[in-house]
Every structure is written in C-alpha cells, then in structure tokens.
Amino acid sequence: MRRFVEEADRGQRTLLPECLDDFIDESNPVRVIDVFVDALGLAEMGFEGVEPAATGRPSYHPSVLLKLYIYGYLNR
C-alpha cells in the first residue's frame, strides 16, 4: 500500500497506553471487521482504487474505508 495514506502502526509503543491495540478489548467486534476485510480480495470484487494512481495526493486504501463503513453500519 505504498501510494496510500499510511496508517499508524498499532504495535508502536507510545506514552499512554503502551500501544494502540490496548485501547480495544479482545472481544470488540472491530477486530472481526479488521480480519474479515483484510481477508477479502477487493480487486477481484471490483473495488476501484485498489491500485493507486501515480499522480495527486495519496488516497486512503479502500479496505480502510470499507472497515469504517461496516463499523458505522453495525453501530448505526
């Protein structure tokens, strides 16, 4: 995902809490959404933008936007 806006490394150590994964409980449904969307073949499903354009500002990867959409749908 080179030409996309880079996300924060969830394993990176910070001051408080130790890492970003500490904010999310192990039983939180957001972890299922993360694994589910990462397992999808978005290019094979016809999602546009999986291959980034060489010009302009980097965009967000479609998998990140799909994760937000599903999370928002589940939480109204």
Image: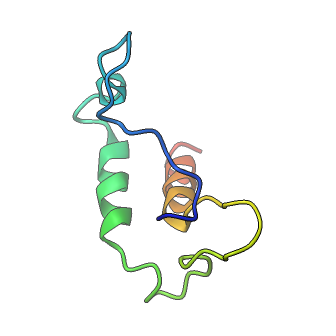
Q: On screen, 71 above or below 8?
A: below
Horizontal side, residue 14 vs residue 2: left or right: left
User: Where does residue 12 sit, x and y in percent of width and height?
Assistant: 33, 30
Q: Based on the displayed image, in which of its 4 quarters is residue 42 positioned?
A: bottom left
Horizontal side, residue 15 vs residue 47: left or right: left
Q: How many marks?
A: 0
Q: On screen, 26 above or below 41?
A: above
Q: Residue, x 59% and y 53% (percent of image)?
A: 5
Q: Is 67 or 15 nearer to us in this picture?
A: 15
Q: Residue, x 61% and y 81% (percent of image)?
A: 48
Q: Residue, x 37% and y 18% (percent of image)?
A: 14
- Name the outermost residue toward the left: 26
Q: Based on the displayed image, in which of its 4 quarters is residue 53 positioned?
A: bottom right
- Name the outermost residue toward the front: 54
Q: Quadrant of the C terminus?
A: top right
Q: Residue, x 53% and y 62% (percent of image)?
A: 66
User: Where does residue 30 sit, x and y in percent of width and height?
Assistant: 37, 44
Q: Based on the displayed image, in which of its 4 quarters is residue 24 positioned?
A: top left
Q: On screen, 18 above or below 42?
A: above
User: Where does residue 56 sit, x and y in percent of width and height?
Assistant: 77, 66
User: Where does residue 1 sit, x and y in percent of width and height?
Assistant: 47, 65
